[in-house]
Image (tube, rainbow, N blue to C red):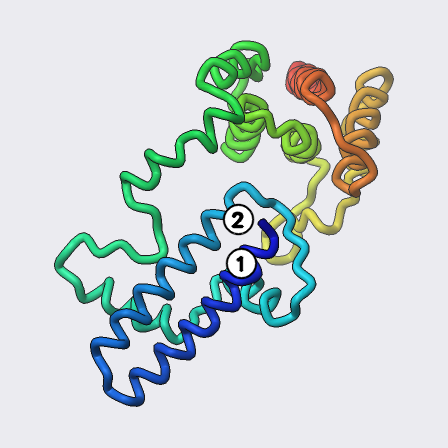
């Protein structure tokens, strides 16, 4: 399959060159054919990459084309197709999957998991229970961690737990008056190291729990480990317990 994607990448480059050539020659018929070929090839390549998180390509020319696609680089053919799409009164689909194509590709999702696993994940993971208002950002990150767990993105859950912890620590420090406003009447969070804030607003067993979570989640964010569903679930629940304890105090 790698040989196929390599050839498609090189063919895409040729199609783009042909588009430029036919524009210069004012050959509308050949230009239309070249644009269609370019569009079909680009969609084929991007469809292949749906299921390919990392692709090794040794051919430099093909690699260059594929990197440009990944970086949303606009080839000359892209610019023309984009212009045609914006000026079209029809449902002109360019560089996107239409409804029928999306339906045909639903197996990409269902061979991974189904709505049963999604709902079961939310059922298992739990929620943050607090007795006072919390920052909107904390609600957003807790919600995102739950969604990641339901979608089986366990490393993401584990990493987000550190962000949840940091938001909770900062909020506790703000309530205790530990974070000070600078001359511009704003709090510069960068002036405070997380370990400093942890020491200032916690003590005893709570401080130990916070530091344990911070160290474990930092290890993942630094690329030193990966986790499974049990690890993610336990870390999320431990993090929520610490957050709830922080707000209780």
Q: Residue furthest left?
A: 89
* 24, above or below 166, in the image: below
- The answer to which of 212 and 8 lies nearer the viewer is 8
Quadrant of the image containing the C terminus: top right
Residue 216 position, x and y percent, is 81, 29
Q: Which residue was labeled with disc 1?
A: 70
Residue 223 quadrant:
top right
Q: Which residue was labeled with disc 2?
A: 49
- The answer to which of 54 and 87 lies nearer the viewer is 54
Residue 57 quadrant:
bottom right
Left or right of 118, for residue 26? left
Q: Please, what secondary structure does the residue beneath circle 1 have? A: helix
Badge 1 density bin: few <14, some 14–19, many ≥20, Cα 10 Å:
few
Left or right of 71, for residue 240? right
Q: Please, what secondary structure does the residue beneath circle 2 have? A: helix
Residue 16 position, x and y percent, is 41, 74
- The answer to which of 80 and 56 lies nearer the viewer is 56
User: Closer to the observer: label 1 or label 2?
Assistant: 2
* 191, above or below 26, in the image: above
N-terminal label among 1 and 2: 2
């Amino acid at each position: 399959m790698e040989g196929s994607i390599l050839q498609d990448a090189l063919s895409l480059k040729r199609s783009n060159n042909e588009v430029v050539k036919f524009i210069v020659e004012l050959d509308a018929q050949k230009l239309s054919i070249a644009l269609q070929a370019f569009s079909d090839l680009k969609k084929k390549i991007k469809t292949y990459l749906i299921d390919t998180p990392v692709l090794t390509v040794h051919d430099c020319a093909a690699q260059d084309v594929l990197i440009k696609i990944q970086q949303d680089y606009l080839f000359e053919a892209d610019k023309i197709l984009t212009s045609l799409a914006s000026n079209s009164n029809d449902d002109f689909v360019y560089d996107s999957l239409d409804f029928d194509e999306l339906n045909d590709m639903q197996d990409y999702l269902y061979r991974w998991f189904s709505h049963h696993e999604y709902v079961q994940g939310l059922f298992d993971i739990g929620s943050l229970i607090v007795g006072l208002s919390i920052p909107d950002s904390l609600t957003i990150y807790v919600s995102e961690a739950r969604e990641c767990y339901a979608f089986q993105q366990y490393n993401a859950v584990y990493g987000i737990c550190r962000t949840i912890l940091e938001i909770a620590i900062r909020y506790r420090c703000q309530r205790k008056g530990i974070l000070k406003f600078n001359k511009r009447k704003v709090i510069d969070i960068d002036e405070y190291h997380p370990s400093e804030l942890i020491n200032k607003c916690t003590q005893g067993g709570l401080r130990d729990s916070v530091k344990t979570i911070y160290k474990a989640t930092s290890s993942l964010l630094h690329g030193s480990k990966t986790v499974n569903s049990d690890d993610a679930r336990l870390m999320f629940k431990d993090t929520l317990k610490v957050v709830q304890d922080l707000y209780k105090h």
